[in-house]
Image (cartoon, rainbow, N blue to C red):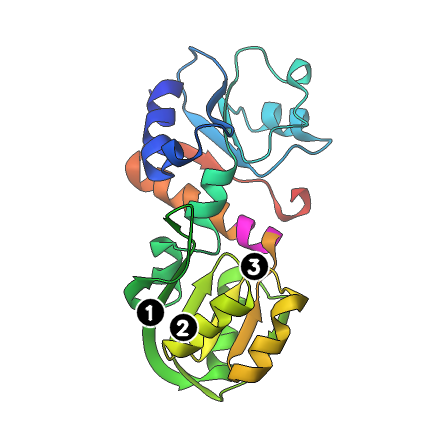
Amino acid sequence: MIELETLAKFLDITLKAEQFAEDVNGVYQHSTQPIRRLGLILEPWSELPDWVRSKQIDALFCHRPWKLELNQLPLAIGILAYHLSFDEALTVGYNPFLANSLGMTELKVLGTKSERPIGMIGEISAQTLERYIQRVKNIFDGIEDVVFGSEQVSRVAVVGAMSAELIQMAADRQAELYITGQLRRSAESAVQATGISLIEIGHHRSEKWGLRALAQILRQQWSALEVILPDSMSW
Protein backbone atom coordinates (compact mmCIF):
# COMPACT_ATOMS: atom_id res chain seq x y z
CA MET A 1 0.00 0.00 0.00
CA ILE A 2 1.07 3.59 -0.60
CA GLU A 3 1.50 6.13 2.19
CA LEU A 4 0.44 9.77 2.07
CA GLU A 5 4.00 11.04 2.54
CA THR A 6 5.17 8.94 -0.40
CA LEU A 7 2.55 10.51 -2.63
CA ALA A 8 3.48 13.99 -1.38
CA LYS A 9 7.17 13.49 -2.15
CA PHE A 10 6.36 12.32 -5.66
CA LEU A 11 4.03 15.26 -6.31
CA ASP A 12 6.53 17.73 -4.85
CA ILE A 13 8.98 16.67 -7.56
CA THR A 14 6.47 16.28 -10.39
CA LEU A 15 4.85 19.67 -9.77
CA LYS A 16 8.10 21.43 -8.75
CA ALA A 17 6.44 22.56 -5.56
CA GLU A 18 9.63 24.10 -4.16
CA GLN A 19 9.06 27.05 -6.52
CA PHE A 20 5.96 27.98 -4.50
CA ALA A 21 7.19 27.62 -0.95
CA GLU A 22 4.68 30.15 0.44
CA ASP A 23 1.66 28.54 -1.25
CA VAL A 24 -0.35 25.45 -0.34
CA ASN A 25 1.79 22.44 -1.23
CA GLY A 26 1.83 18.90 0.08
CA VAL A 27 0.05 17.33 3.03
CA TYR A 28 -3.04 19.34 4.03
CA GLN A 29 -4.36 16.76 6.48
CA HIS A 30 -2.12 14.03 7.82
CA SER A 31 -3.08 10.37 7.85
CA THR A 32 -1.29 7.10 8.46
CA GLN A 33 -3.94 5.14 6.57
CA PRO A 34 -2.52 3.16 3.64
CA ILE A 35 -3.83 4.44 0.33
CA ARG A 36 -5.49 2.09 -2.11
CA ARG A 37 -8.01 4.54 -3.63
CA LEU A 38 -7.05 8.17 -4.26
CA GLY A 39 -9.64 10.77 -5.24
CA LEU A 40 -8.64 13.78 -7.35
CA ILE A 41 -10.75 16.94 -7.16
CA LEU A 42 -10.35 20.57 -8.14
CA GLU A 43 -12.37 21.90 -5.21
CA PRO A 44 -15.06 20.72 -2.79
CA TRP A 45 -18.73 20.51 -3.74
CA SER A 46 -21.75 19.88 -1.56
CA GLU A 47 -21.90 16.12 -2.15
CA LEU A 48 -18.18 15.55 -1.61
CA PRO A 49 -18.56 13.69 1.73
CA ASP A 50 -21.05 11.28 0.15
CA TRP A 51 -18.77 10.79 -2.86
CA VAL A 52 -15.78 10.05 -0.62
CA ARG A 53 -17.71 7.43 1.30
CA SER A 54 -19.43 5.84 -1.70
CA LYS A 55 -16.14 5.53 -3.59
CA GLN A 56 -14.29 4.33 -0.46
CA ILE A 57 -11.65 7.02 -0.92
CA ASP A 58 -8.60 6.65 1.34
CA ALA A 59 -7.00 10.01 0.46
CA LEU A 60 -7.82 13.14 -1.54
CA PHE A 61 -5.86 15.42 -3.85
CA CYS A 62 -7.53 18.84 -3.81
CA HIS A 63 -6.38 21.74 -6.01
CA ARG A 64 -8.29 24.44 -4.10
CA PRO A 65 -8.86 23.22 -0.52
CA TRP A 66 -10.06 26.51 1.00
CA LYS A 67 -13.68 25.40 1.43
CA LEU A 68 -13.04 21.84 2.53
CA GLU A 69 -15.19 20.99 5.54
CA LEU A 70 -12.86 18.54 7.24
CA ASN A 71 -15.37 17.69 9.94
CA GLN A 72 -17.67 16.31 7.22
CA LEU A 73 -15.07 13.87 5.91
CA PRO A 74 -13.92 10.57 7.42
CA LEU A 75 -11.39 11.25 10.19
CA ALA A 76 -8.83 8.83 8.77
CA ILE A 77 -8.69 10.39 5.30
CA GLY A 78 -5.44 12.02 4.18
CA ILE A 79 -5.53 15.17 2.06
CA LEU A 80 -2.95 16.57 -0.35
CA ALA A 81 -3.30 20.09 -1.73
CA TYR A 82 -1.33 21.77 -4.52
CA HIS A 83 -2.50 25.12 -5.83
CA LEU A 84 -0.15 27.30 -7.92
CA SER A 85 2.29 24.46 -8.59
CA PHE A 86 -0.51 22.39 -10.15
CA ASP A 87 -1.66 25.31 -12.32
CA GLU A 88 1.83 26.02 -13.59
CA ALA A 89 2.88 22.41 -14.18
CA LEU A 90 -0.32 20.86 -15.52
CA THR A 91 -2.45 23.50 -17.19
CA VAL A 92 -1.75 25.98 -20.01
CA GLY A 93 1.90 27.00 -19.84
CA TYR A 94 5.25 25.27 -20.12
CA ASN A 95 3.74 21.81 -19.90
CA PRO A 96 5.48 18.92 -21.70
CA PHE A 97 2.55 16.61 -20.87
CA LEU A 98 0.19 18.95 -22.72
CA ALA A 99 2.69 19.45 -25.53
CA ASN A 100 2.60 15.71 -26.17
CA SER A 101 -1.20 15.77 -26.44
CA LEU A 102 -1.02 18.76 -28.79
CA GLY A 103 1.52 17.03 -31.03
CA MET A 104 4.20 19.64 -30.30
CA THR A 105 7.90 18.89 -30.68
CA GLU A 106 11.18 20.83 -30.34
CA LEU A 107 9.85 22.72 -27.33
CA LYS A 108 11.39 26.03 -26.34
CA VAL A 109 10.53 28.40 -23.51
CA LEU A 110 8.34 31.37 -24.39
CA GLY A 111 8.05 33.94 -21.62
CA THR A 112 9.12 33.85 -17.98
CA LYS A 113 7.86 35.01 -14.60
CA SER A 114 10.22 35.21 -11.65
CA GLU A 115 12.70 33.30 -13.84
CA ARG A 116 10.21 30.44 -14.30
CA PRO A 117 8.95 29.52 -17.80
CA ILE A 118 5.28 30.38 -18.30
CA GLY A 119 4.93 29.28 -21.91
CA MET A 120 6.29 27.05 -24.64
CA ILE A 121 6.63 27.20 -28.40
CA GLY A 122 7.03 24.18 -30.62
CA GLU A 123 6.50 22.59 -34.00
CA ILE A 124 3.48 20.60 -35.15
CA SER A 125 2.75 18.86 -38.43
CA ALA A 126 1.62 21.49 -40.92
CA GLN A 127 -2.17 21.58 -41.22
CA THR A 128 -5.14 23.89 -41.51
CA LEU A 129 -6.11 25.94 -38.51
CA GLU A 130 -9.60 24.46 -38.63
CA ARG A 131 -8.23 20.94 -38.32
CA TYR A 132 -6.02 21.88 -35.39
CA ILE A 133 -8.86 23.69 -33.63
CA GLN A 134 -10.80 20.44 -33.71
CA ARG A 135 -7.86 18.61 -32.13
CA VAL A 136 -7.70 21.20 -29.34
CA LYS A 137 -11.45 20.89 -28.78
CA ASN A 138 -11.12 17.13 -28.46
CA ILE A 139 -8.29 17.46 -25.94
CA PHE A 140 -10.05 19.97 -23.70
CA ASP A 141 -13.67 18.95 -24.29
CA GLY A 142 -14.31 22.27 -25.97
CA ILE A 143 -12.86 25.77 -26.06
CA GLU A 144 -14.06 29.26 -25.13
CA ASP A 145 -13.18 31.35 -28.17
CA VAL A 146 -11.09 31.59 -31.34
CA VAL A 147 -9.54 34.59 -33.09
CA PHE A 148 -8.83 33.60 -36.69
CA GLY A 149 -5.60 34.67 -38.34
CA SER A 150 -3.43 32.45 -40.53
CA GLU A 151 -5.32 29.60 -42.21
CA GLN A 152 -2.33 27.25 -41.84
CA VAL A 153 -0.41 26.35 -38.70
CA SER A 154 2.92 24.61 -38.16
CA ARG A 155 4.27 26.38 -35.05
CA VAL A 156 2.26 26.85 -31.86
CA ALA A 157 2.76 28.91 -28.70
CA VAL A 158 1.06 27.77 -25.48
CA VAL A 159 1.29 30.37 -22.74
CA GLY A 160 -0.24 30.70 -19.30
CA ALA A 161 -0.65 34.45 -19.75
CA MET A 162 -1.62 36.89 -22.46
CA SER A 163 -0.05 40.30 -23.04
CA ALA A 164 0.87 42.39 -26.06
CA GLU A 165 4.53 41.62 -25.38
CA LEU A 166 3.96 37.85 -25.30
CA ILE A 167 1.82 37.94 -28.44
CA GLN A 168 4.52 39.88 -30.26
CA MET A 169 7.20 37.51 -28.98
CA ALA A 170 5.27 34.50 -30.32
CA ALA A 171 4.72 36.18 -33.69
CA ASP A 172 8.39 37.18 -33.93
CA ARG A 173 9.29 33.52 -33.45
CA GLN A 174 6.98 32.54 -36.33
CA ALA A 175 4.14 31.05 -34.32
CA GLU A 176 0.90 31.10 -36.30
CA LEU A 177 -1.22 30.15 -33.27
CA TYR A 178 -1.27 31.30 -29.64
CA ILE A 179 -3.10 29.11 -27.11
CA THR A 180 -3.88 30.52 -23.68
CA GLY A 181 -6.24 29.98 -20.78
CA GLN A 182 -8.00 33.32 -20.77
CA LEU A 183 -8.28 36.03 -23.40
CA ARG A 184 -7.13 39.47 -22.23
CA ARG A 185 -8.82 42.40 -23.95
CA SER A 186 -5.75 44.56 -23.39
CA ALA A 187 -3.75 42.34 -25.77
CA GLU A 188 -6.35 42.02 -28.55
CA SER A 189 -4.79 44.85 -30.55
CA ALA A 190 -1.50 42.92 -30.66
CA VAL A 191 -3.36 39.85 -31.95
CA GLN A 192 -4.88 41.91 -34.75
CA ALA A 193 -1.60 43.67 -35.55
CA THR A 194 0.41 40.45 -35.83
CA GLY A 195 -2.27 38.41 -37.60
CA ILE A 196 -1.67 35.50 -35.24
CA SER A 197 -4.52 33.11 -34.52
CA LEU A 198 -5.59 32.59 -30.93
CA ILE A 199 -7.46 29.90 -29.00
CA GLU A 200 -8.86 30.65 -25.56
CA ILE A 201 -9.22 27.40 -23.63
CA GLY A 202 -10.80 28.68 -20.42
CA HIS A 203 -9.03 28.36 -17.07
CA HIS A 204 -11.44 25.85 -15.54
CA ARG A 205 -11.35 23.69 -18.66
CA SER A 206 -7.54 23.64 -18.57
CA GLU A 207 -7.63 22.65 -14.88
CA LYS A 208 -9.91 19.72 -15.70
CA TRP A 209 -7.44 18.59 -18.34
CA GLY A 210 -4.66 18.91 -15.76
CA LEU A 211 -6.50 16.74 -13.27
CA ARG A 212 -7.01 14.04 -15.91
CA ALA A 213 -3.32 14.28 -16.79
CA LEU A 214 -2.37 13.92 -13.13
CA ALA A 215 -4.53 10.81 -12.88
CA GLN A 216 -2.62 9.29 -15.78
CA ILE A 217 0.76 10.21 -14.26
CA LEU A 218 -0.15 8.61 -10.94
CA ARG A 219 -1.50 5.45 -12.57
CA GLN A 220 1.72 5.06 -14.52
CA GLN A 221 3.77 5.51 -11.34
CA TRP A 222 1.72 3.07 -9.23
CA SER A 223 -0.21 0.44 -11.14
CA ALA A 224 -1.89 -0.79 -7.95
CA LEU A 225 -3.22 2.67 -7.05
CA GLU A 226 -6.86 3.29 -8.00
CA VAL A 227 -7.16 6.94 -9.03
CA ILE A 228 -10.74 8.20 -9.07
CA LEU A 229 -12.10 11.38 -10.69
CA PRO A 230 -15.53 12.91 -10.06
CA ASP A 231 -18.20 12.39 -12.68
CA SER A 232 -18.86 15.28 -15.04
CA MET A 233 -21.72 16.69 -12.97
CA SER A 234 -19.44 17.31 -9.98
CA TRP A 235 -16.95 19.65 -11.60
Give the tally of numbered discs.
3
Rendering coords of residue 172 (x, y %): 40, 78
Instruction: Identify which residue is drawn at 73% across, 31% down.
Output: 46
On screen, 218 above or below 208? above
> Along the polypeptide, which appears first: circle 2 or circle 1?
1
* Crowdedness near tag 2: few (<14), some (14–19) or many (≥20) residues, C-alpha within 10 Å: many
In whole angstroms, how far apart are the C-alphas of marks 3 and 2? Answer: 14 Å
The residue at the point 59 percent across, 26 percent down is 52
Is disc 3 placed on a helix, strand or loop? loop
Name the residue that disc number 2 marks. Answer: 156
* Disc on res. 181: 3
Q: Nearer the viewer, residue 39 or 200?
A: 200
> Which residue, given by chain and number where applicable, does mark 1 sit on?
122
The residues colored magenta run 204-208
* Circle 1: residue type: Gly
Residue 3: image quadrant is: top left
- Dominant secondary structure of the magenta stretch? helix
Please tell me whether residue 184 is drawn above or below residue 116 in the rendered image: below
